[in-house]
């Protein structure tokens, strides 16, 4: 039988999430002017490809699933299957295609991933305001992650990645021929998980992703910070009975790069300085925080129904959307789908974007 107390707790949690979403949507109608929007290079590195996570408003830092390589690699050690492979497709600022694979050992795991982002005919707006049309361009990234379980409750991971972009390749700007851009970066992540009430689980995760030096990106002589991001996540996994399960997830994220472009700052200084460098003070720093919240209901872990909400302050880009999705498991295979409904046309993204994930776990 489903516990009444669990239903009440879940209802209260859902109402709180809904109220927060309504309040943030209401607030954004009164603040539409951009306020020092942060520009980064290789933005696809911060894109979440997994459809299950996308359906939950990109709240994946504390969620344990086979897309963990790109949300919190420490969670790979907590997966129940010893081997898994996933193919992801996400439509957004380009067409993002990802292939990832993981393999578990006694107390550790390895994961590899390849990302390809097709940009099509890119339009580049240079720092001087010039608009340049590029040919068909693409971006690549290769990730390798090592995860280790120090106990059944605590896991950590380190991810290394190399990335490459042909954005504006062979274009001529001010007499200079643009060459492809490339670089290296790293993620560090951790996950704490514990059991409460005998069957329910609480997960708390944290990551600092895309730690790397600024890169020249599409314009000669200008180095842009890559999207170094601090993410803290919370997930509550409620097991009602043998058939019904519900996961609540919440992520808090902040770009930890300088608010104002400064090519003289190192990556380390930029990360530390990013918490108090906004010209608008504490209020503007708070505007740089994004929130993602979502729920995942599963029946016998075979059928999933998901919903989520993602919020970014309109003065920082306004990427605000509701998301819906679902999944089905057949044998060792899984198919997940997500669809995002953007409610702010100011956002510089492709509205109403689709995500698909096909995975196999053994």
Image (tube, rainbow, N blue to C red):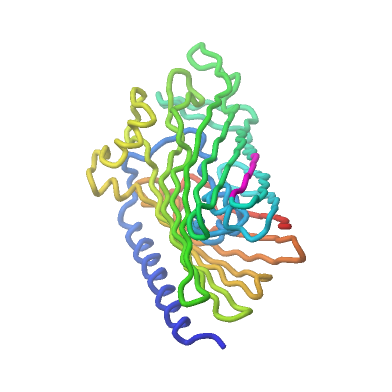
User: How many circles with numbers are drawn on the protein?
Assistant: 0
Judge by depth and name the residue closer to the eye, 323 or 31.
Answer: 323
Picture layout, residue 111 above or below residue 10? above
Whole-percent x, y for residue 359 in the image: 70, 55
At x 33%, y 31%, the residue is: 269
Whole-percent x, y for residue 73 in the image: 55, 48
In reply to whether residue 284 is colored magenta, the answer given is no
Q: Quadrant of the N terminus?
A: bottom right
Left or right: 331 as drawn, with respect to 349 = right
In reply to whether residue 111 is colored magenta, the answer given is yes
Query: What residue occupies the far right of the structure in this picture?
Result: 331
Judge by depth and name the residue closer to the eye, 280 or 14.
Answer: 14
Query: What residue occupies the far top of the structure in this picture?
Result: 175
Judge by depth and name the residue closer to the eye, 167 or 199.
Answer: 199
Q: Quadrant of the C terminus?
A: bottom right
Whole-percent x, y for residue 173 in the image: 50, 17
Segment tinted magenta in the rendering: 108-114
Splitting the image into 4 quarters, where does residue 330 fall?
bottom right
Picture layout, residue 132 above or below residue 107? above
Q: Main secondary structure of the magenta part?
A: strand
At x 60%, y 35%, the residue is: 141
Splitting the image into 4 quarters, where does residue 256 fall?
top left
Answer yes or no: is residue 35 visible: yes
Answer yes or no: is residue 339 visible: no
At x 35%, y 30%, the residue is: 261
Whole-percent x, y for residue 118 in the image: 64, 37
Left or right: 330 as drawn, with respect to 56 = right
């Amino acid at each position: 039988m489903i516990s009444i107390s669990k239903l009440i707790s879940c209802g209260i949690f859902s109402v709180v999430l809904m109220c927060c979403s309504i309040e943030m949507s209401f607030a954004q109608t009164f603040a539409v002017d951009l306020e020092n929007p942060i520009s980064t290079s290789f933005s696809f590195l911060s894109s979440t490809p997994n459809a299950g996570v996308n359906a939950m408003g990109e709240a994946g830092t504390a969620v344990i699933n086979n897309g963990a390589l790109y949300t919190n690699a420490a969670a790979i050690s907590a997966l129940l299957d010893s081997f898994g492979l996933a193919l992801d497709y996400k439509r957004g600022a380009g067409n993002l295609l990802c292939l990832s694979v993981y393999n578990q050992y006694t107390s550790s795991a390895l994961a590899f991933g390849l990302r390809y982002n097709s940009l099509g005919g890119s339009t580049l707006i240079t720092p001087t305001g010039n608009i340049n049309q590029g040919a068909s361009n693409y971006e690549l990234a290769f990730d390798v992650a090592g995860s280790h379980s120090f106990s059944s409750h605590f896991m950590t991971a380190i991810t290394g990645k190399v990335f490459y972009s042909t954005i504006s390749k062979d274009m001529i700007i001010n007499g200079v021929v643009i060459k492809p851009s490339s670089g290296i970066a790293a993620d560090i992540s951790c996950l704490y998980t514990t059991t409460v009430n005998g069957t329910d689980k609480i997960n708390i995760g944290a990551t600092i992703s895309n730690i790397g030096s600024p890169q020249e990106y599409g314009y000669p002589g200008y180095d842009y910070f890559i999207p170094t991001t601090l993410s803290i996540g919370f997930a509550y996994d409620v097991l009602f009975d043998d058939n019904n399960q519900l996961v609540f997830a919440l992520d808090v994220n902040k770009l930890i790069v300088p608010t104002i472009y400064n090519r003289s700052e190192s990556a380390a200084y930029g990360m530390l300085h990013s918490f108090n460098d906004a010209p608008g003070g504490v209020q503007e720093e708070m505007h740089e925080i994004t929130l993602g919240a979502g729920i995942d209901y599963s029946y016998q872990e075979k059928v999933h129904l998901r919903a989520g909400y993602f919020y970014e302050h309109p003065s920082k880009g306004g990427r605000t959307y509701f998301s819906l999705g679902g999944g089905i498991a057949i044998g060792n295979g899984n198919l997940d789908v997500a669809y995002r409904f953007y409610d702010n046309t100011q956002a510089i993204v492709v509205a109403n974007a689709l995500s698909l994930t096909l995975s196999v776990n053994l």
